[in-house]
Image: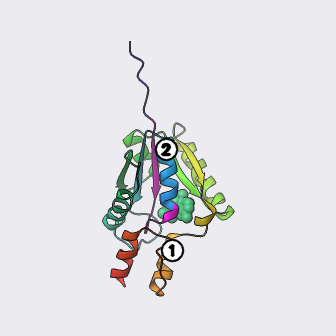
Amino acid sequence: MEDKKEIKIAVYPGSFDPVTKGHLDILERASSMFDKVIIAVLKNNSKKSYMPTTDRVELIKQSIADIKGLNNVEVDSFDGLTIDYARKVGAKFLIRGLRAVSDFEYEMQLSQTNQAIAPEIGTVFLITKPKYNFISSGIVKELSFLGQDVSKFVPKSVVEYLEKKK
Ligand code: ADP
């Protein structure tokens, strides 16, 4: 009988409000490690989002269209628990990016909570490149509202979106 190898699917969950070059760097690296990566926008979480989910999804789609080699990446959105979504799509891995030590404590707690309720799903942490270390969606929005050019930090589609929103 033919040996069927299970395809390795990872979910990269987040608010992506909006997506930044830091997120895209993590996504590119995850895409080279897994057979399929689903970047999944969380619809409702405790953070109040600035942009509607559909816009956040659309901006990710536009930004990855310009990046070569991301053919194994899908963009989606979800509600509720990340592990329930991961189970639904058959993913055994979650991707999270780490910037500073300050991210670590929260991420460890989140990952261990997920481990406790879904032991079959593991979290893979990727450390951001130093040049993206300080970039957060929050800082980008603030800089943009204050008239600063944010094209170094976010993809072109996001720059244009934020310009229009002003
Ligand atoms: P959440 O609200 O779930 O923290 P975010 O959209 O802020 O969602 O971030 C999603 C993931 O991307 C998190 O794992 C976060 O640590 C990571 N991340 C955010 N900004 C960067 C960055 N500049 N470089 C690398 N990873 C990042």
The location of residue 134, given as percent across then percent down, is: 60, 70
The location of residue 67, given as percent across then percent down, is: 41, 56
The residue carrying mark 2 is 32
Q: Is residue 71 left or right of residue 141?
A: left
Looking at this rendering, what residue extends furthest in the top direction? Answer: 1
Which residue shows up at 50% across the image and 71% down it? 153
For residue 15: magenta? yes
| Residue 134 position (above or below residue 149) | above
Label 1 is placed on what type of residue?
Gly
Q: The N terminus appears in which quarter of the rendering? A: top left
| Residue 134 position (above or below residue 97) | below
The residue carrying mark 1 is 138
Q: Which residues are magenta?
A: 8-22
Which residue shows up at 45% across the image and 84% down it? 145
**Most foreground residue, 39 or 44:** 39
> For disc 2, does the CB lie below 8 Å from ligand 1?
no
Disc nearest the viewer among 1 and 2: 2
Looking at this rendering, what residue extends furthest in the bottom direction? Answer: 146
Label 2 is placed on what type of residue?
Ser
Give the secondary structure at mark 2.
Answer: helix
Give how far apart the Cα atoms at labels 1 and 2 are. 28 Å
For residue 37: magenta? no
The location of residue 52, given as percent across then percent down, is: 34, 69
